[in-house]
Image (tube, rainbow, N blue to C red):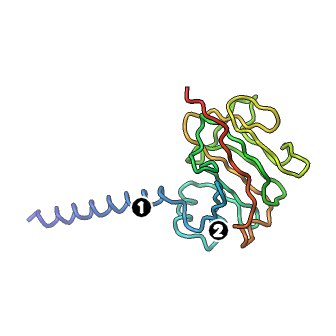
C-alpha cells in the first residue's frame, strides 16, 4: 500500500538530487563556450551579449557580477604562465610586452575564483595604463612578486594559486573578429619561494 508512494518519492529525490548536483558541477567545470585563447590569456567576448551561451548566462546570473558590454571593453584572464604552469602566489613573475589598443587598461590579481587578492595599503595590488613606466617603443615590464622591485611592481603574497586579470576599456578589440591576431603581454616566471 505504501510501497508505490515511497518508490515515487525516492525516485524523485534521486532525480532532483543528481540533477541539481550535475548542473552545479557543470557550471563549475566551464565558464561557457566561445573563449578566445591568446597565449596565457583567455577572454569571453560574447559573455555580455544576447548571443551568450546558456553556461555563460548562468555564471553571470549566479555570480551577480556586472560585466562590461561588448562596446565597453574586454576582460582577459591568465591562470598560467607562458609555459602552461599555474600561477602561484608563492612565485614571482614578469608581465612584459604590449597590450592591444585601448583607451585605458588595468592589471590586477585575483584568486582562481575571481576574488581580489589585496595587498597591505602601502603596497600596490594593481597597475594601470596611466601609471605604467614604458620603454621608448611602448613596451613595458611589470614585476609581480612578494618583494619590492624597481619600476613597475605589483605585490603578490598569497598562499594559493592566483590569476592575472587584464581589463581593456574602450577598445576596438572588443568588437573585432580578428582577436586571434592580437599581441598580448607574456607572463614569465622569475622564480618561486618554496621555503
Circle 2: element type: loop
- Label 1 vs 2, first from the N-terminus: 1
Determine the residue located farthest toward the top in the rendered image.
195
Give the position of the C terminus as an image quadrant: top right
Q: Residue at x 73, y 56 (%)?
A: 184
Q: Residue at x 78, y 44 (%)?
A: 141
Near mark 1 (Cα within 10 A), the count class, few <14, some 14-19 or many ≥20, is few
Disc 1 marks which residue?
A: 23
Q: Which mark is residue 46?
A: 2
Which mark is in front, 1 or 2? 2
Residues 84 and 172: in front is 84
- Where residue 117 sits, quadrant-wise, is top right
Q: Position of residue 87 (x, y in %)?
A: 60, 43
Q: Position of residue 114 (x, y in %)?
A: 60, 48
Position above or below: 49 against 87: below
Q: Is residue 93 rendered to the left or right of residue 114?
A: right
Q: Marks 1 and 2, Cα distance to the nearest angstrom?
A: 22 Å
Amino acid at each position: 500500500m505504501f510501497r508505490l508512494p515511497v518508490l515515487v518519492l525516492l525516485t524523485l529525490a534521486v532525480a532532483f538530487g543528481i540533477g541539481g548536483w550535475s548542473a552545479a558541477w557543470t557550471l563549475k567545470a566551464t565558464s561557457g563556450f566561445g573563449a578566445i585563447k591568446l597565449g596565457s590569456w583567455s577572454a569571453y567576448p560574447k559573455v555580455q551579449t544576447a548571443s551568450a551561451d546558456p553556461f555563460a548566462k548562468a555564471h553571470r546570473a549566479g555570480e551577480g557580477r556586472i560585466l562590461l558590454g561588448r562596446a565597453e571593453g574586454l576582460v582577459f584572464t591568465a591562470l598560467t604562465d607562458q609555459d602552461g604552469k599555474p600561477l602561484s602566489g608563492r612565485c614571482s613573475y614578469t608581465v612584459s610586452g604590449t597590450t592591444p589598443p585601448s583607451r585605458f587598461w588595468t592589471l590586477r590579481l585575483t584568486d582562481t575564483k575571481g576574488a581580489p587578492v589585496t595587498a597591505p595599503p602601502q603596497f600596490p595590488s594593481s597597475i594601470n595604463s596611466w601609471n605604467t613606466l614604458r620603454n621608448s617603443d611602448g613596451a613595458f615590464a611589470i614585476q609581480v612578486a612578494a618583494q619590492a622591485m624597481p619600476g613597475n611592481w605589483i605585490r603578490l603574497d598569497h598562499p594559493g594559486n592566483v590569476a592575472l586579470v587584464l581589463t581593456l576599456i574602450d577598445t576596438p578589440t572588443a568588437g573585432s573578429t580578428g582577436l586571434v591576431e592580437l599581441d598580448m603581454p607574456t607572463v614569465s616566471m622569475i622564480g618561486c619561494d618554496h621555503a
